[in-house]
Image (tube, rainbow, N blue to C red):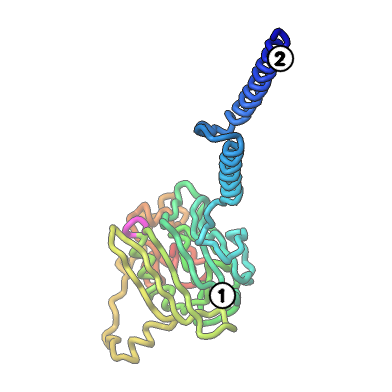
Amino acid sequence: MHKKMNYLIFLLITVLMVGCTNTGDNSIKNVELKPQEVTTVGTNNNKDKEETITTVVEEQEVDVVVEETTTEPKNELFSGYKLIEVAGGDLSGYREPNVAVDIGYGNREYWAFTNEYGQLVRVIADEIILQDDSNEPVLSSGRYYSDEAKVPGVVSDVLDEGHIIADSLGGVSNAYNITPQDSTLNRHGDQAYMEDVIRSTGGATNFEAIITYPNTETQIPSRYQYTYTLMGNEIVDTFYNVNPDEVNASLGLTSTEPSESTSSNTNGDISSVDTNGNGQVTIKEAKAAGFSMPIMSDHWLYPFMRDNDNDGMVGE
């Protein structure tokens, strides 16, 4: 009887030791699970717990993969274009294909885009900021630079080095802002009128120019389309790169009566304008006297001003 009691006591001690060992294992597993925030395992056996842990780990691995593959959204504006920098006064007429260039003077951001043939096809600006001749190094001619880029085609008797965005509107003079443009169109036609309207209203927003060509070989555009917003109104100007006077004459729209000269001072007295008395009128002096730009060749002030590029227009 005594032996049987000892045997039962031994079995009871053995069972208690096994139970303690299992409890220790479970405690260790719970410690390992805390960093993974597995909080509900129910009353399933150890096998079920292992399956639950495996499922949670797999979900965490998926989350990690998603984070690693997340990228910043691409800028669609420059998609397909190489961004390059070109000096504003670069006189080279060469353009790289499929590039985007900032053609705004100073801190302005005016973006020009070329196609695969190096043709200037688009110019955009969120805001057109007028030239500030009081705080910017503007020449007496009203320009930022003394000359413009020599894009193929500009050396012509009837074509000007036409700015897509004029100096007076904050544009530079490199090849990414210059196209060979009909002289009359540039100086007195729709191009000049559009620039004058933007100046008179103090700038524009949502500006876009679309330039088209007759073929892929030339750098001389055939057509311009300008879209911009003035005082909350969207304006679309479309015109061809031709002499508007000739077009109007062919349509019978040209008056046969001589136009009235804009000369209003036959004596040529510039004393009220020429503030420093040197006999020459600068852009700044003309503006201070209340004259709007540009001053055309038939204006009485024109002979007293410097037209560096001899295009019949000062301060454009």
Q: Residues within 10 Å of mark 1 (few under 14, many from 20)?
A: many
Q: Is residue 224 something one can see in this rendering?
A: yes
- Residue at (57% x, 51% y) in the render: 71
Q: Main secondary structure of the magenta part?
A: loop
Label disc, if present, on residue 189 of the rendered structure: none
Residue 78 lies in what quarter of the image?
bottom right
Q: What's the distance in space between the residues labelled 1 and 2, CA to CA? A: 102 Å
* In magenta segment, residue 202: yes
Sequence-wise first label, 1 or 2: 2
Q: Amino acid at mark 2?
A: Tyr
143 to 238, vertically: above or below:
above
**Which element carries disc 1, helix, strand or loop?**
loop
Q: Horizontal placement of 33 versus 303: left or right?
A: right
* In magenta segment, residue 17: no
- Residue nearest the viewer, comparing 189 with 225: 225
- Residue nearest the viewer, comparing 75 with 190: 75
Q: Amino acid at mark 1?
A: Gln
220 to 229, vertically: above or below:
below
For the residues carrying marks 1 and 2, which lies nearer the camera in this image? 2
Residue 54 location in percent, x, y?
Answer: 61, 42
308 to 7, vertically: above or below:
below
Q: Name the residue at the top extreme.
A: 2
Residue 30 lies in what quarter of the image?
top right
Q: Image quadrant for the N terminus?
A: top right
Q: Is residue 304 something one can see in this rendering?
A: no
**Which element carries disc 2, helix, strand or loop?**
helix
Q: Which residue is mark 1?
A: 119
Magenta region: which residues?
A: 200-204
Residue 226 lies in what quarter of the image?
bottom left
- Residue nearest the viewer, comparing 279 with 307: 307
Q: Which residue is mark 2?
A: 7
- Residue nearest the viewer, comparing 68 with 198: 68
